[in-house]
Structures are given as C-alpha cells and as structure tokens.
Image (cartoon, rainbow, N blue to C red):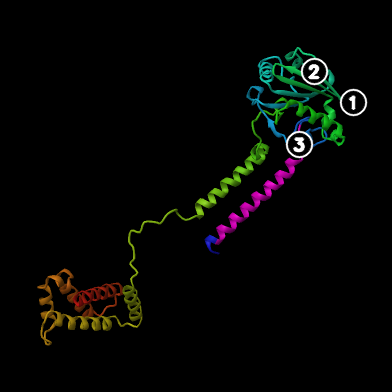
Amino acid sequence: MNKAVRLKKIISYTVAFIFIFMIALFITRKNAEYPPYTSHSPAEDGVKALFLLAERMGYETYRFYEPVKNLPDNSTMVAIRPQYQWPGTGTELEDLRKWIYRGNTLVLIDDEDNLYSSLILDITTSFPSVNNEYRDLVAHYYTAGRGKIILLFGADNYINKSLENVAPGIVFIEALDFSGANKVFFNEYCHGYKKMNYGVWDLLGTIEKVVFVQILLSLICLIVTGAVRFGRPQEVFEIAKREENERVFALSNLYSRFKSNNTVLKAQLNILKKELLSFLELGHNADTSEIILAASQNKMLESLNTAKILKTCESYIKGGRINTRKLLFLAKQIHKIRKEIRI
C-alpha cells in the first residue's frame, strides 16, 4: 500500500474517533449532575429554564463566575438560593453594596426565612417601595443608593419544574423590567463555580482530558513523521534533463544492450572529423593526428578540449570494452563540439 494512502487512512480514522469521542462526551455531559438552583442544570431542581426565559424575552443573559467586584455597571444580577452563606460579611458584601449603590440591581430569589435574616437587607434602610403579589407569589422592591434590591420569595417556585406554571415567569420578568437594565448576569459564583468561562475543556473530566491529549499527540506524531518536508529541498547535484541529453542517454542504453557502443561512437567520431576538416580548412586526406594537432592550435577548440576528446574517443574504440557512463560522456562532448563549430 502506498505510504501516502496509508497515512491518509490513519488520519481519517483518528479524526473519526475524536469526533465520535466528542459526541459521546457531549451526550454524557448533557446529563451530568449539577447542584440545584444553578442555571447550568436542566434537571427539575435547576433554573436553566429561567435563564432561557430571560433570553427569549430579549435580555442579554450571561453566567457570571467571579466575585461581585468584577460585575459591570448598568446591569442586573440574579442570585438564586445562594450557597456558602453568600455574600458573607467581608469584602464580598461590601463590594456588593458599592455595586448596587452605583445604580445596579440585585434580584435575590430565596426562601422567606433566609431573605428576612439575610445580611443583604443591611444594604438598604428603606422599606419596600413596592410589594408585588401575583397568585401567592410575593416580590419586594427596595431602593439602595441609586440602585435596587428585588427579593422574590420561595426559590422552589422558580426551578425548572415549577415554571410549568406561568405565574413565576411573569413575576421574574416584571422584576427584570423594574430593574431597567438589559444585561442580566446569573450568579454562578455563589454556587461554587469560580471560573470565568466554561468551554469544552472545562467540561472534560480528568480521564477524558488524558485520553484527549494522548489522541492529539498521536495525531501530531503521525503528521510529523508522514508529511514531507516543507519547502523545496535544495538540489546539490541537479540533473539537467535537456532534450538532447535524454536522446543521447536513451540511445546509449539501447546500443549498450545490443553491444554496439564502439560502432555508435565511431560513427559520431567520423562525423565530427569531417566537420573539423571543413572548420580547420584541412585537406580531405588529413588523418586523425593532423586533426588533433590543428585542434590543439585553435583557441576555441582548445577551450573545448577537442584534442583530448579525440584522443579519448580513439582510445575507447580501440579498447573494445563497454562503459555506458563513459560513452554517454564522450557522446555529449562530441555533440557540444559540433554545436560550437556550426555557429
């Protein structure tokens, strides 16, 4: 099998395997277990439906994985049933206070007991400016500096399963409308997600990452070992495939096969002698030694080593041995001399 075809098949199989691996990974990760009340989770206790609802209603929805100090202004943050006693009593609470006071809005969804005891209420000293009740769903709207805090009671009313009822969705969208900002950030930092972005690599487990790296390295090795060198290689001894050289080489092989080297060279040498007699203005009865002597005294013929070539041809013909390489060399030299004296 051709090496290039074999390499192509190996690469095709490897790419196909990676593709199947990624599909299988996507299917398994699609059903992965997430903590409750996170916008990543499509399970019954997740709030992905609430995230998609805000998106469908025209809001720019994002998931946020950093502390509050990195939140942009002119936006709304949604925190649903925070874990780990978020925002605590330290810098996170103070940063949240400053962010709200600059004119931003916090929508906090939690159970009633947690909301009333929450330290978030320390941010504002105002009484609720609006008490919104819709089908037993309560929402309190507070002002804090130039910003707002909106408390929605009953976190379980806003999970995926509960959104089969339209009432929680209406209350949530009214809260977003009241905030007046188009950018909505769902806080995943309060659920333990502390990375800025979640790409495919972040969704891979340790074993999957090791397997993927091994496949990638194998593919790189195949490409490096099987691919040709980039760029044109430098030709140290370049073969000039001119038409006359190819003809001479072909005839040399043919004559060598039929043991005709000496006869061919002798015929070419006789033609050269006749042309030299005319070029040097010698008589028709001049022998080879006279031609060699006259050629050695001519500057142009001397630069072509004509006298030496004539002697070498005579010696090769008398020797009777077959040497294809030498025959090719002598034939090319005879052709070169004939070409020069014709000019």
Check disc 3 and give the amino acid type: Met
Mark nearest the camera among 1 and 2 is 2
Per the image, the residue denoted by label 2 is 129
Kind of residue at badge 1:
Asp
Q: Which label number is shown at residue 136?
A: 1
**Image-quadrant location for residue 138:** top right
Circle 3 residue: 57
- Within 10 Å of disc 1 (Cα), the crowding (few <14, some 14-19, many 20+) is few
Give the CA distance from mark 2 to mark 3: 25 Å
- Residue at the (69%, 23%) spot, across then down: 104
User: Measured from the top left, where is residue 201 in percent x and y?
Assistant: 64, 39
Ranked by sequence position, the earlier of labels 2 and 3 is 3
Please report contact status of discs 2 and 3: CB closer than 8 Å, yes or no: no
Q: Closest to the observer: 160 or 32?
A: 160
Residue 255 vertical position relative to residue 232 in the rendered view, above or below: below
In the image, which residues are magenta? 5-34
Q: Nearer the viewer, residue 220 or 201?
A: 201
Cα gap from disc 1 to disc 3, whole angstroms: 23 Å
The first of marks 1 and 2 along the sequence is: 2
Residue reaching furthest top? 125
Residue at position x 84%, y 31% in the image: 168
Q: Report if residue 86 is visible in the image.
A: no
- Asked if disc 1 and disc 3 are in contact, CB closer than 8 Å, the reply is no
> Looking at the picture, does residue 139 appear above or below residue 204?
above
In the image, which is nearer the foreground, mark 1 or mark 3?
3
Image spot of residue 11 (x, y percent): 58, 54
Contact between marks 1 and 2 (CB within 8 A): the answer is: no
Q: Amino acid at mark 2?
A: Ser
The reply, left or right, for residue 118 in relation to residue 286 is: right
